[in-house]
Image: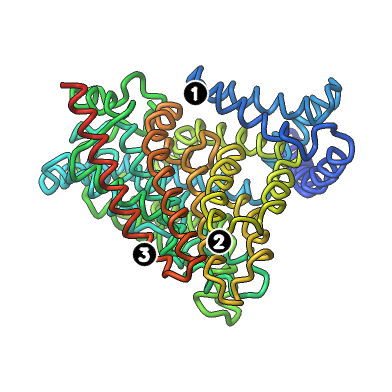
Amino acid sequence: MKQLYKHRRALILLTGLAAIMLVMPAMAEDAAEKIAATSHYYNTFWALVPSFVAIILALITKEVYSSLFIGITVGAVLAANGNFERTLENIFTNGIVASVSDSYNVGILVFLIMLGSIVALMNKAGGSAAFGRWAEDHIKTRRGAQLSTILLGILIFIDDYFNCLTVGSVMRPVTDRHKISRAKLAYLIDATAAPICIIAPISSWAAAVSGFVADGSGLALFIRTIPYNFYALLTIAMMLTLTIKNIDYGPMAKYEKNAKAGDIFSGPNPYENETDKVPEGKGRVIDLVLPIIVLVTCCVIGMVYTGGIFSGANFIDAFSNSDASIGLMLGSAFGLLFSIIYYVARKSFSFREAMGCIPEGFKAMVPAIMILVFAWSLKNMTSFLGADVYVAGVIEGSARGLQMFLPAVIFLIGCVLSFATGTSWGTFGILIPIVLEAFPWSQGNPISIVCVAACMAGAVCGDHCSPISDTTIMSSAGAQCEHVNHVSTQLPYAMTCAVVSAIGYLIAGIFAVHSIPAVIALPMAALLMITVTVVIGRKTDEAEG
């Protein structure tokens, strides 16, 4: 009878949670409309202040959890016009609870947990250690380890979340053996995540961008913009230059110097847990490679499944219409199931031990999950305050003036908006419809394609720099690097690339207006990017010498 009572309590609890999951999205939507109608700060510059507060505090204090929460609190106070009761409601009900109850966010969290569990299984089976031993025999230099990380990041172009965590779990043992700092690993992961996905026609990002074009020609427009996506292409050029020429500058130079002396973290390891204690014995490289191949395959199938490939859609259309959250969640579920069956069948460990890896993987992802939840809550606050409406109005008011400068201006506005809100996809949704309304690309206007590319590049740039960006957080988690360390070391590299990209868009805008092929601006910008990187690197070496 007592056992039955426990089951009844569990059933009531699950029913209550399901009801909350169904009701909260509608409550959040009602809250947004209510705040828009009552807040004195709606659709003003103050809408961006909560994000700026969180970012500045994180960079000053080097503590991200409290910084994000303070940013959420500032946004809640502004949205409530200082009312204490409504401020608490905004922080918890409309902020944290609404973020966790969002179905897309829940899918991402489940994906993270299952991916963490797969990594824990790989480590327990000795697959990571075996790959480390193989890499020790085949990858002889620090340059080779970094180039291998870049190559793997480019190959996993399907989704940035999947890229960050998979590349990190595979390459950590390799980069650790060659004394590459975790901050440098996090940069390489981040630089091959969003910048690669945004120029890959078959990716969740291509699907997202295509969805913002109303006439169904979104994928064709996406492909046309690839040669003009300067920030993504120049990030790859800069990353390869840094690696091949063995250049580092800014805070990264100090972290790499410490790593060569044996301190790869330049401080404590925030992700230290049992999953890092890898047995050195019976594992083989196939124990790492095979589960990853199955995981990639299952994630691709999961994404095209959500896009309707089994209902008659072709592969491209299915990928364009896919739901990344559900697809990745389904793919990782089947990947986890395969990993358990494979390792138990190979007698790497018992079924009971395999089940023990699931909570271990969950624990390894707790820091990333906490930061994601707070970041999503902060995005809710800026959305309630109308940050997107404010920025859209600023752009729309000047969209038709000074066309030759417009690509550079749109790029910079995209950077600021994405940096402040931490969302590149939200930035796409704001800027791309405005640009296409002002300059319809179907009319053959070359400035239209360049401006859409500038929207995408600016969004990725801001996302790359922002400490509250999902991808930045995932890269820290994948590299198991202190999040603030990753942000502070990556920022000088990203800002250098942003400045060169802005110059590239200025040149492309001038060319497009004067009927000169704007694509000529790409090799000019790439040459400038390589030159600037080498010059800064040499100046840094001379200063240290």
Residue 108 location (% of width, % of height): 56, 48
Separation of marks 1 and 3 at Cα, in angstroms: 38 Å
Q: Which amino acid does label 3 sit on?
A: Ile
- Using the image as rendered, state which of residue 8 and residue 228 is in the foreground: 228
Name the residue that disc number 1 marks: 59
Determine crowd level at label 3: few under 14, some 14-19, many 20+ residues with C-alpha closer than 10 A.
some
Quarter that holds the N terminus? top right
Quarter that holds the C terminus? top left
Discs 3/2, front = 3
Residue 45, quarter of picture: top right
Separation of marks 3 and 2 at Cα, in angstroms: 17 Å
Residue 481 location (% of width, % of height): 38, 31
Q: What residue type is labelled 2?
A: Val
Q: What residue type is labelled 1?
A: Leu
Name the residue that disc number 2 marks: 452
With 46 as the anchor, is 359 left or right in this view? left
**Is 11 placed above or below 249 here?**
below
